Image (cartoon, grey):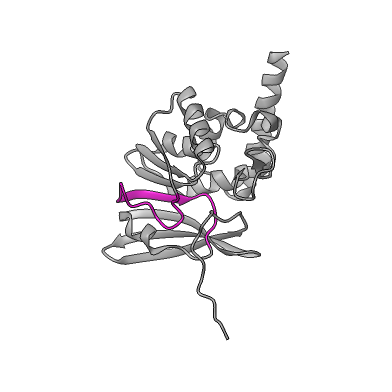
Amino acid sequence: MSTTTQIDFEKARYNMVEQQIRPWDVLDQQVLDLLFTVRREDFAPAKYRSLAFTDMEIPLKDNALPDERMLAPKLEARMVQELAIKPADRILEIGTGSGYMTALLAKRGAHVTSVEINPEFAASALAKLNAHGITNVSVEVGDGARGWAAKAPYDVIVLTGSVPVLAEDFQRSLKPGGRLLAVVGEEPVMEALLVTCAGGASYSKLALFETCIPALRNAPQPARFVF
């Protein structure tokens, strides 16, 4: 029985890569190989394990809030690819969630500081990371929607939830040459932006693709005009 289940998971993983992720312009072979190494189903809640490879956001618990979900697999893979992570990179992740994205980042870089607002999710993710022998991660409980400068500067920063406006503290936490990936905007129009620090207070911004994902809790809001 277990052998059959394992074969099904491997087939589902292969189909996920070939039918969802490659067509979404994820062509970096190292990233694709990583998707076979880090077992996504082990990070999904047990109740939704069979959905781990579907093109959808998976709830992290019953009655989950919009921001309490795993991102779709193709978005996670595309984010990792666009960040062009190097082996020596120190990474900041805002929104640990299931810990799966954390695991992908940790396999690519030197160390990940991952910040999670929900203590239950933080503890669960850390246990799963440890179970997989992924120890180059610090999971910290806190609200990182406006920045997390305690261990700055970083080579890579990634936000796993959207923000209507991007707090400037994130840019200031980048090393020269550092990259920041965030989904910025409000429904129905959001854009994945790649911000690169050129040194000093100089930054370049590249719009990568349009998408729509739940906002980080307590994300900063744009100024509203009052008439």
Q: Which of 141 and 98 lies nearest the eye of the viewer?
A: 141
What range is drawn magenta here?
A: 143-163
Q: Where 6 sits versus 101, above or below?
A: above
Count of marks placed on residues: 0
Observer-nearest residue: 40 or 11? 40
- The secondary structure that dominates the magenta segment is loop
Q: Residue at x 59, y 63 (%)?
A: 190
Residue 3, horizontal then vertical, whole percent = 69, 14
**Residue occupying the far bottom of the picture:** 227
Of all residues, the one furthest to the left in this rendering is 200
Can you see residue 26?
no
Q: Quadrant of residue 113?
A: top left
Q: Residue at x 41, y 50 (%)?
A: 157
- Residue 147, magenta (yes or no): yes
Residue 30 part of the magenta segment: no
Residue at 39 percent of width and 34 percent of height: 137
Rendered-image quadrant of the C terminus: bottom right
Q: Quick one: quadrant of the N terminus?
A: top right
Report x, y in % for residue 77: 55, 43
Q: Is residue 47 visible?
A: yes
Left or right side of 53 for 31: left
- Judging depth in this view, the residue of 102 and 141 nearest the camera is 141
Residue 224 location in percent, x, y?
54, 76
* Residue shown at the point (37%, 32%) measured from the top left: 136
